[in-house]
Image (tube, rainbow, N blue to C red):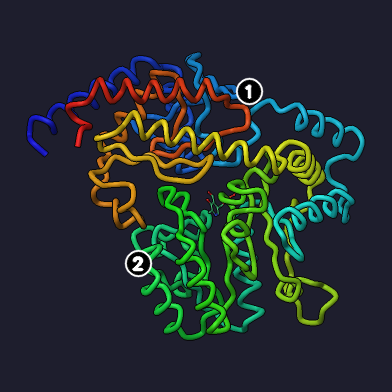
Amino acid sequence: MSPARAHAAKTALEAAEARFIANNPLSKKQHELAVGVLPGGNTRTLLHTSPFPLTMKQGKGAYVWDKDGHKYLDLVGELTAGLYGHSNPVIRETIVSTFDNVGLSLGSTTVQEHKHAALLCSRFKLERVRMANTGTEANMHALAGARHFTSRRKVVVFSGGYHGAVFSFPNGKPAPNTVDKDDFVVVPRYNDVDLAVSTIKSTPDLAAVLVEPMQGAGGCIPGTKKFLHAIQDAAHEVGALYILDEVMTSRLAPYGLGVKLGLKPDLVTMGKYLGGGLAFGAFGGREKVMAVYDPRVEGSLAHSGTFNNNTLVMSVGYEALKRVFTEEACVELNQRGDRLRERLMQVTKVTKILFTGKGSLIGVHFVDKSLESITCGEDIQDKERRDLRDLFWFEMLEEGFWTTRRGFVALTLETEEHELEGFVEAVGEFVERHRDIVAL
Ligand SMILES: Cc1ncc(COP(=O)(O)O)c(C=O)c1O
């Protein structure tokens, strides 16, 4: 890059950041208060942004409002968990009626957990399922189950994989807070069939292969059908379980992305929107494997969690999936996402801006590469223009669009086509404004 272009990018970013500070005094003040009790001012590291994060004070329909009163179209969609938007009437009615007619904490098995379990099994083609509170927990229990079932320890995962707060594998290594760190073998490139298969076949004591069918936090990079089938076959060949992490991707097709791709995982983990906007996780799959959690069986594993069958989340998750995110609604939402990505690619032609992903989940990247050449995080990692990504984030905020700073968009059911077209226009104007620095 020429020094003139680098200078222009730096100047534009500094100006955008200065406007952000000037426009958001109340968010700034909130952050200064919050750091007094919360390390860094928040309880979700991902949400920290420098110089300070925006504090949202309300969400309604497809929109959120920050403390300083700005209104944004919500394209964060709570990192996929906010699928239903902020004001779905079925969700509201279910919260109120569950509170009034069932109550919150019964300290017993409940009808609601059976209903939600039966729906999850039929929708996602699982023989048995168990509930948890988060996707992280779902993966933790799935891994414990796989280890018990196989009497083995090791787990093959992929660079860029994210399976929860304590299971993340950026840059080919377990993050420092990874639980049972030494048990993970990280394949250094997602989508690399030969590397993955040879790692699976040469890892002794292998209990499971754990993979996202599309890496979400890793940049919305879809796994190829060939890759996902090859690692499934290799896992089975060596007697290991195949665990598909569908915490983000189950929303991408009516029965989940794995079923759409013809995969037959032994276990599937889920979470996010399946609690209807409340804390949720679940793991399920083959009856024989899930029997490791059957308390009637001698020597089975315990799977505990005070809130696993919380009446509120069981009821809301069930009604929302059954009545709102129907198979038809799922297809429609993901088609809307595909159309949006196509439009975004049109207005950013011959620039460094790329949109990865599938259906209603979109990754925004700033890199000198073609879309087809991106098969894993390593293809973009050191080449990503973070300065341009930050500039984009600041300027989309000014235009009234709430996206994540790291470049992730998740549509909600409440976001309408014409609102998305407004986003496309804003992106097109961004390109016009900064053509000198974003052009290839
Ligand atoms: C693929 C995947 N697995 C697991 C998780 C963890 O879910 P939770 O944040 O509910 O613990 C996430 C969260 O983003 C995820 O994207």
**Is 107 above or below relative to 35?**
below
Q: Secondary structure at mark 1?
A: loop
Q: Position of residue 62 (x, y in %)?
A: 59, 24
Q: Position of residue 188 (x, y in %)?
A: 35, 67
Residue on which disc 2 sits: 188
Residue on which disc 1 sits: 61
Q: Amino acid at mark 1?
A: Gly
Compare residues 97 and 83 and report the one nearer the observer: 83
**Is 151 above or below relative to 1?**
below
Is label 1 within 8 A of ligand 1 (CB to nearest ligand atom)? no
Q: Residue furthest right?
A: 101
Dot placed on the residue nearer the N-terminal end, 1 or 2: 1
* Image quadrant where one finds the C terminus: top left
Q: Give the residue at x 56% y 49%.
A: 248
Q: Quadrant of residue 395?
A: top left
Q: Amino acid at mark 2?
A: Pro
- Describe residue 244's horizontal placement relative to residue 117 as left or right: left
Q: Is residue 306 visible?
A: no
Q: Residue furthest left?
A: 3
Q: Give the residue at x 50% y 42%.
A: 361
Q: Position of residue 239 (x, y in %)?
A: 58, 83
